[in-house]
């Protein structure tokens, strides 16, 4: 049901590839459903075709698509079941044969009976529909392969054949660039023809704009006599607007029964394609359309005649039948469609040939034989055994050099395995060293070399558990460089970095080996003191204070002395965790800064 709804939506959205060629992609899901669901998949394609018939009014197109799906289902049923033959890619070749044998002749017959088109136009319509069919079959088959690949991750028995993969890749790689290139060429062609048409209408409209009022009828007659079939309406903005129409009846009919055509191929400012509102085939509506140029909206119209008329602004609307230009574009489009058809046929043949050869070369039936192999057991610390091949006969050669040389790789596999084992061992050693270096970098501050905030909490959690278990003291000291921002702003980043490095050196020189110094902020450091009472922590902090205050820090030709503020907290057994212990030390540090800095405050 979901596939049917999506297929109907894709058919209702016509993809304009280039002028005269549109893609309806709903049939691709019909092909996908055939490959996945068998007979049930016919419902998807037939329902999408019937709805398309009702909306777009193309019964012959729907009929050919339905017969196409029945043909493909018959192929899958009588030439191999879906599971074994569906992923071979031959369904694309079967679709090409359908259009050559049945589809194109049937379209020509139906069009010949139901329309009055010339044989060349009928042939182009048949070829366009056949291209649509082959492209849809290619897309449907490619989606089927994607579905099979996704299932392969959970069930290796659902793997796809290399033949089908090659067929899909070749078709997609040739169809996609061909459509893009031809679409660009067609777009440039349409734009060039349309610009030429607009320039011609602009020239006539500018002439009408500057023609005196008493000569307008003579100008209209001359345009009719010359066979240009151009009609115009001139509106002069005076106190009483003056309007002149070369053919009032035709202009009234166009105004009442024609509306702007939203065809994406025709988009030029100032010129519109007007098509009848009556229901009719798309091509017929285009042929019976009219070009309309509004001189005011065309960009250069007003610049042309401003200043040449003194009695009011003039605007001109020019109308010209689009039949000649549309037929010219149709002729060019037919050539492009012919090129696309030949490219598509070449892609199908190439994919079939390459897929056939590759499937032969990868087939195990071409393996002539395998010689005896000797197994040597080499006990190592992993307890694994190594097998050394003594003699292997080669695969039958094909056109792929890499596969022809596979026997050389097999004969050298023992040496390669030994080499890989040595490389693996060396890699393990390097990986272990790298992990150790990474562990160190992950817990240290790159500037000062002391631990970082993450390691502070880890060490503090460990010491808390030990202190609670042993009923021992634990203190935390937080200190910060006074006037950190002023020093950085006055002396620069290099000086403040030198201050931090020297500060850490002074603290570490006076700390115990069991103490843990960490950088807990940009200018803030924390020191974890295991088995240290609050009195001992205050005494040690006083030493830090004096040592830092008396040091002179020198960088280049600059000298500076700094001070620190210190906050101390001591563990309250059973009441503190690492977070609360640090918070109390940081609160004490904050009070020390508020009380004037260069001092110690204990929480």
Image: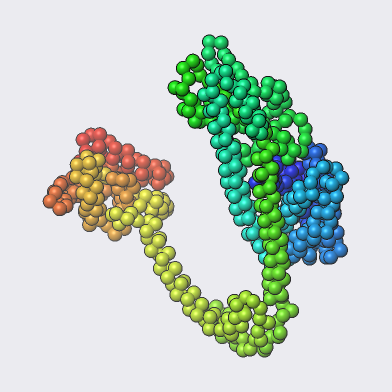
Q: Position of residue 438 (x, y in %)?
A: 40, 61
Q: Position of residue 182 (x, y in %)?
A: 62, 52
Residue at position x 28%, y 42% in the image: 567
Q: Is residue 144 visible?
A: no
Report the side of 451 relative to 70 (left or right).
Answer: left
115 or 572: nearer the eye?
115
Q: Image quarter for residue 11?
A: top right
Residue at position x 63%, y 59% in the image: 173
434 or 515: nearer the eye?
434
Q: Is residue 400 visible?
A: yes
Residue at position x 23%, y 43% in the image: 488
Is residue 168 shown above or below 235? below
Q: Quadrant of the N terminus?
A: top right
Report the side of 125 relative to 405 (left or right).
Answer: right
Type of colouring: rainbow
Report the side of 504 relative to 550 (left or right).
Answer: right
Q: Position of residue 409 (x, y in %)?
A: 58, 81
Marks counted in the figure total 0
Residue at position x 39%, y 57% in the image: 442
Q: Position of residue 433 (x, y in %)?
A: 40, 68
Q: Quadrant of the C terminus?
A: top left
């Amino acid at each position: 049901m979901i596939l049917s709804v999506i297929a109907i939506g894709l058919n209702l959205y016509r993809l304009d590839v280039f002028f005269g060629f549109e893609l309806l992609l709903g049939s691709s899901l019909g092909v996908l459903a055939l490959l996945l669901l068998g007979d049930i998949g016919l419902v998807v394609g037939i329902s999408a075709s019937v709805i398309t018939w009702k909306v777009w009014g193309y019964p012959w197109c729907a009929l050919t698509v339905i017969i196409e799906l029945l043909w493909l289902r018959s192929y899958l049923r009588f030439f191999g079941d879906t599971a074994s033959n569906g992923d071979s890619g031959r369904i694309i070749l079967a679709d090409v044969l359908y259009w050559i044998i049945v589809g194109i002749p049937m379209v020509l017959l139906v069009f010949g009976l139901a329309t009055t088109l010339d044989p060349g136009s009928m042939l182009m319509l048949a070829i366009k529909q056949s291209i649509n069919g082959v492209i849809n079959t290619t897309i449907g088959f490619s989606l089927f392969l994607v579905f099979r690949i996704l299932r392969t991750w959970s069930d290796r028995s659902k793997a796809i054949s290399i033949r089908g993969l090659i067929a899909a890749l070749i078709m997609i790689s040739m169809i996609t660039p061909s459509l893009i290139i031809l679409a660009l060429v067609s777009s440039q062609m349409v734009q060039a023809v349309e610009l030429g048409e607009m320039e011609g209408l602009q020239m006539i409209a500018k002439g009408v704009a500057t023609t005196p009022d008493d000569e307008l009828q003579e100008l209209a007659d001359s345009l009719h006599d010359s066979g240009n079939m151009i009609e115009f309406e001139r509106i002069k903005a005076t106190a009483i607007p003056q309007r002149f129409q070369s053919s009032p009846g035709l202009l009234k009919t166009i105004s009442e029964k024609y509306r702007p055509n939203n065809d994406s191929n025709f988009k030029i400012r100032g010129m519109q394609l007007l098509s009848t509102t009556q229901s009719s085939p798309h091509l017929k509506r285009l042929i019976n359309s009219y070009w309309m140029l509004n001189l005011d909206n065309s960009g250069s119209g007003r610049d042309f005649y401003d200043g040449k008329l003194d009695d009011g602004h003039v605007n001109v609307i020019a109308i010209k039948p689009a039949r000649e230009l549309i037929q010219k574009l149709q002729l060019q489009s037919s050539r492009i469609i012919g090129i696309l058809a030949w490219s598509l046929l070449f892609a199908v043949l190439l994919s079939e040939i390459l897929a056939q050869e590759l499937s032969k070369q990868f087939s195990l039936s071409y393996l002539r034989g395998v010689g005896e192999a000797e197994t040597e057991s080499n006990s190592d610390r992993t307890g694994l055994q190594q097998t050394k091949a003594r003699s292997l006969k080669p695969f039958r050669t094909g056109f792929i050099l890499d596969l022809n040389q596979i026997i050389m790789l097999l004969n050298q596999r023992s040496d390669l395995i030994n080499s890989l084992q040595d490389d693996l061992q060396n890699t393990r050693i390097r990986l272990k060293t790298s992990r150790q270096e990474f562990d160190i970098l992950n817990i240290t501050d790159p500037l000062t070399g002391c631990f970082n905030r993450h390691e502070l909490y880890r060490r503090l959690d460990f010491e808390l558990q030990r202190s609670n278990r042993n009923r021992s003291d634990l203190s935390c000291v937080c200190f910060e460089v006074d006037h950190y921002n002023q020093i950085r702003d006055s002396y620069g980043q290099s000086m403040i970095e030198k201050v931090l490095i020297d500060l850490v050196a002074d603290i570490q020189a006076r700390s115990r080996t069991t103490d843990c110094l960490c950088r807990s902020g940009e200018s803030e450091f924390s020191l974890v003191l295991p088995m240290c009472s609050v009195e001992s922590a205050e005494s040690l902090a006083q030493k830090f204070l004096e040592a830092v205050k008396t040091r002179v820090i020198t960088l280049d030709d600059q000298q500076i002395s700094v001070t620190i503020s210190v906050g101390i907290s001591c563990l309250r057994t059973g009441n503190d965790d690492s977070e609360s212990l640090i918070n109390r030390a940081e609160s004490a540090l904050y009070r020390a800064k508020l009380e004037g800095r260069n001092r110690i405050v204990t929480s």
